[in-house]
Image (cartoon, grey):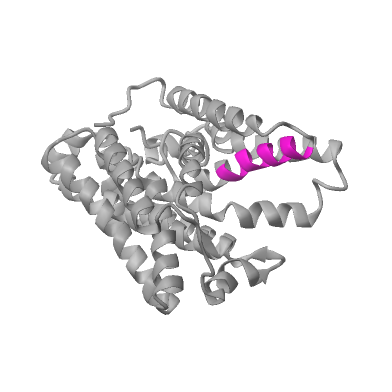
Amino acid sequence: MTDKTAPSAAAPTRGGIDWKYQAERFALIIAWLLLIVGFGSLMPDSFLSWRSFSAMFGSQSVLVVLTLAILLPLTSGDFDLSGASVLVLSAMLIAILNVQMNWPVLPAILVALAAGALVGAANAFFALYFRIHSLIVTLGIGTFVNGVILWISRSQTIAGISMDLVGWVIIKRLFGIPLAFYYALLLAAVLWYIFEYTIPGRRLLFVGRGREVSRLNGINVTAARAASFIFSGVIAALAGVLYAGMTGSADPLSGLSLLLPAFAAAFLGATTISPGRFNPIGSVVAVYFLVTGITGLTMLGAEAYVQNLFYGGALVIAVALSQLVRKRQPQDFS
């Protein structure tokens, strides 16, 4: 995958600033601002209220964290279609352990995170040891996890999760925005630092750009890809913790619908900030760009099906745009 942050691409030319590249970097942010201005001019009292923005920022933190989870395998050249399933499994384990078995919420969270790591390790094992395409492996593992969720929950919603978790996720606020939003931003900042300034992060980027070249340069490609799957599972489970805290319950099905928006945001984010590569900050911007569009259309009275149209269309357009940024070079997902 082309890394626009490489010195040859990201640094200004000797003649001055590369304005074309800078326009690519910030085009989505500008489009987001124009979207806000457009909806704001149509609904100044409702859309531009701080309550509206705080609701958007806080409610979408789960989607941000899930997007960051699937970002890791995408960076290494793999797909992870099990992320939403891990999210729901995590929330369900917390609900069962905390509500039905009277566990304290912290040990329940640790078990949920361990379950995410286990699912990630299973994805890595089947994809890397048997050399099966990650798309097939993670689709199968995700479906298997869905079955486990229905089995352990008996296909029922479990409510009554500890208010300690709910309080630290959605009730406690800073500047009127739930703390979940700041957790998501902190995670994005940590991943950005890892990709930009640490050896493991740079190795993962190199693996995504070319596995054979990385292998010839002494990088353990298998270990890098395995780590991306495992940490993806842990972060997806963290999204499930936030999901449980935001709703105070666990539903065996509702969280699965977040997978498509997460992929749409990940690919759309690859067109901004660091164009041509999947990046955490771009993904956060993309999530809120998409959510702003959905929120604005909903407030204008759009029907419920518009959300599917918007997210589905955004995914196709985002993939097309990311390919244009990469000059239509084929991506190595295998």
Residue 183 seen in the figure: no
Asked if residue 83 lies left or right of residue 268, the reply is left
Q: Position of residue 192 (x, y in %)?
A: 43, 53
Residue at 20 percent of width and 36 percent of height: 211
**Vertically, is 68 above or below 15?**
below
Q: Is residue 298 magenta?
A: yes
Q: Position of residue 144 (x, y in %)?
A: 29, 45
Residue 92 seen in the figure: yes
Q: Can you tell which quarter of the image residue 259 is in?
A: top left
Q: Nearer the viewer, residue 31 or 267?
A: 267
Quadrant location of the N terminus in the rendered image: top left
**Vertically, is 105 above or below 253?**
below
Give the residues in magenta.
287-299
Asked if residue 202 lies left or right of residue 175, the reply is left
Residue at 35 percent of width and 64 percent of height: 113
Q: Position of residue 47 (x, y in %)?
A: 80, 45
Looking at the magenta stretch, what is its main secondary structure?
helix
Q: Is residue 156 magenta?
A: no
Q: Nearer the viewer, residue 117 or 208?
A: 117
Q: Position of residue 141 (x, y in %)?
A: 27, 44
